[in-house]
Image (spheres, rainbow, N blue to C red):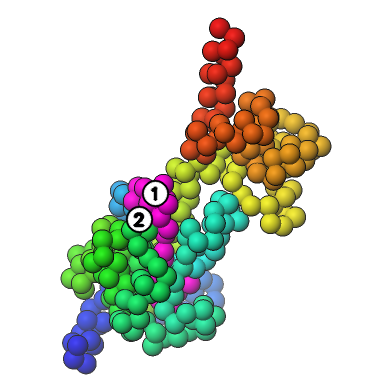
Amino acid sequence: MEENDLFNEISLLATEQNNPRTRNIDIASTEEILRMINEEDKTVPFAVEKEIPNIASAVEIIVEAFRKGGRLFYVGAGTSGRLGIVDAAECPPTFGTPPEMVQGIIAGGVDAVFRAQEGAEDDIERGRQIIDEFGIRSPDVVVGIAASGRTPFVKSAVNEAKRRGIKTIFIATSPVDKVRELGVEADEYICPVVGPEVIAGSTRMKSGTAQKLVLNMLTTASMVKLGKTYGNVMVDLQLTNNKLRERAKKIVMDICGVDYATAQKTLSEADGKVKVALVMLLAKVDKNTAIRLLEESQGFVKIAIHKAKERRDETNS
């Protein structure tokens, strides 16, 4: 691409425009600066709301992949890459997923998480290479994250995945038509248009917030559909520290109506598996039966309990 063409492409990006509402931020008082930022931030959830149908389609793609043993890969650069890594890193302790199930890839590698590696986002060839390097293949899913929609590293990774028949999702805060014009090829596009940033081009602000909200929705909704919650309570957490061990006991106590000692004893018998402990107590079965019921119910606690009740009724009838 010629230098002038690149200049024109970047200059026309929605994420690079000047925000008329914050033009005098440099001479505003501290409180006025904060109010400007806050007013702009308030618009972000409404932009994300408009994309819920597309987010729902993306969740269905991800859930189908997980059920087939596939993995979810976030690919981004700069702020977008770091947000993907954060979301991926939080899945194992929150939902009890293996670390490889959701992974984050950032342009520039691990060093870029802590210190900006700005040139890395332009590496088209490296974007293609990560598909092989990480062994990405169907039924895996690749989610590209790029506020502008043009980031070469991200775009090349997504397009290479798509070319190989791997399901792809693209998250940007530019209009979807513009993202397509930039050459992004994806199975699903999620494009909350948040408008110009408080500080022109600073996409760690509204764009970053929108991306974080979308990533939260993608993994949380997917995990709910995989049976990782009981109602709105996380019940597939890994007991990797004291806080999580005590949280697990409280979950068992609250849901099953038992005391601390009973919750502790049942969790111990269940090898620390909250879902198994819940089925043991609520369905009044032993550990092995609880495990079998959960397997038959694809991990859903309520369905496992219902199955146990049905079988008990059949036996008593």
Judged from the image, the secondary structure of the residue bearing numbered disc 2 is loop
Span highlighted in magenta in the image: 59-82
Q: Is residue 75 magenta?
A: yes
- Residue 2 coordinates in the image, percent (x, y): 18, 91
Seen at 39% across and 84% down, the residue is 120
Q: Is residue 160 above or below residue 65?
A: below
Q: Residue at x 49, y 68 (%)?
A: 85
* Mark number displayed over residue 223: none
Is residue 77 highlighted in magenta? Answer: yes
The residue where tag 2 is placed is: 139
Q: Are the residues flagged by discs 2 and 1 in contact, CB closer than 8 Å?
A: yes
Q: Which mark is residue 68?
A: 1
Looking at the image, which residue is at 30% across and 52% down? Answer: 54
Q: Position of residue 149 (x, y in %)?
A: 29, 71
Cα separation between marks 2 and 1:
7 Å
Tell which residue pokes out farthest to the top in this image.
317
